[in-house]
Image: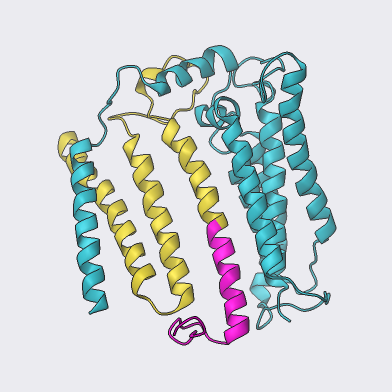
Amino acid sequence: MKKFIVIITLAVLGFYLGETFYELGFGNARFEHGVKDTYLEKTVSELHVANTVTSIIVNFRGFDTLGEVTVLFLAATALGGILYKKKHHAGDRSVLFPASRIVMSGSKLLFPAVILLGVYIFVHGHLSPGGGFQGGTIVATGFLLMLLAYDDFTVSHHVLSYVESFAGIFFVLFGLAGFCNGGTFLENFMPVGTMNDLFSGGIIPIVYILVGFKVAAELTGLIYTVLHEKD
Amino acid sequence: MDEKIFEIMQFGVYTASILLILIGLYAALTKKSLIKIVIGLSIVDAGIHLLLIAIGYINLGTAPIFSPGYEDAAAKMVDPVPQALVLTAIVIGFAVTAVALSLVIRLYRHHHTLEIDEIKNLKW
């Protein structure tokens, strides 16, 4: 009976959603001069950055990125607070059985390559697809691989909290430095170089590198908390 | 030939994302195990992100990245604003899933079961 009501409700919801999007159409440009035209044009002329999505996230709507970094920090803190344990044993893990031989030798080979890939992606966030969030997640995946394969691989939790906190503090300090140079919060006050250069775009690569560090440290700390919660 | 492929793709992308939303909602509403409910919420997230990005597509458009030598190709690029919004949405979806899973771990530690029918403390 309950499943029948759920299916009827979902069918009505799906019908109205489908009708709305069928009328909206797929792939037609709806505005002659929308917001995206200004962003696409200013990215080349003012900022000299090749990746438009990066320039929207860090520069044009940079305050939302600050809010998003705060949401990540709150999630990691909430998770650490909910899974609170009074004592900390060094060797206690919630993994049921040890990893096989293939996983152990393969992850030792893959770990530097994954870290290098993640660092490459968040350093080149303004030149190619990628950026801080994506690269930070890849670095955290590398750490997850090593943590699952080896029992005695530890990452110092204090180093992770320091890296995460300092990256967040420097992000806000860069925003305040925009104030000191006579502009607004998070304004681009450093010189923009030529396009498609590594050092172009003002504060955009620096802010994205800080976001990459913060996301990597945060996700690794989160994985570490969940892995050590067996009491 | 191009027109026909475009017609099929138009229905395909919107249908797939709306189906993902409905499947995820069905799992979140009717399943009895807590982990399946959290997985259902994650599937709803995936469907919504796909739907948001599909709105910003422009016919025969390309990715909004300026390669060297093509700096004036701004007229043929897709909309970059929904992609920036969906990046934020992905991070927030991940944060919600992480906190929900930690609550599931605490519930399991306390009641020693994952079925929501057997967690009866708040029922009358």
Q: Is residue A105 visible?
A: no
Q: Is residue A189 left or right of residue B104?
A: right
Q: Position of residue A216 (x, y in %)?
A: 69, 50
Q: Which quadrant, please, contains the N terminus of chain A?
A: bottom left
Q: Is residue B30 visible?
A: yes
Chain B shade = yellow
Chain A shade = cyan
Q: Quadrant of residue A10?
A: bottom left
Q: Nearer the viewer, residue B1 or A44?
A: A44
Q: Nearer the viewer, residue A122 or A9?
A: A9
Image point (67%, 40%), residue name: A211
Q: Is residue A55 left or right of residue B6?
A: right
Q: Position of residue A99 (x, y in %)?
A: 67, 77
Image point (77%, 79%), residue name: A92
Residue bounds of the magenta highlight: B96-124
- The answer to if B22 sits in the magenta stretch is no
Q: Is residue B45 above or below residue B89?
A: below
Q: Nearer the viewer, residue B3 or A21?
A: A21
Image point (73%, 71%), residue name: A84
Q: Is residue B70 above or below residue A70?
A: above
Q: Is residue B67 above or below residue A148?
A: above
- The answer to if B104 sits in the magenta stretch is yes
Q: Position of residue A152 (x, y in %)?
A: 80, 72
Q: Is residue B81 above or below residue A81?
A: above
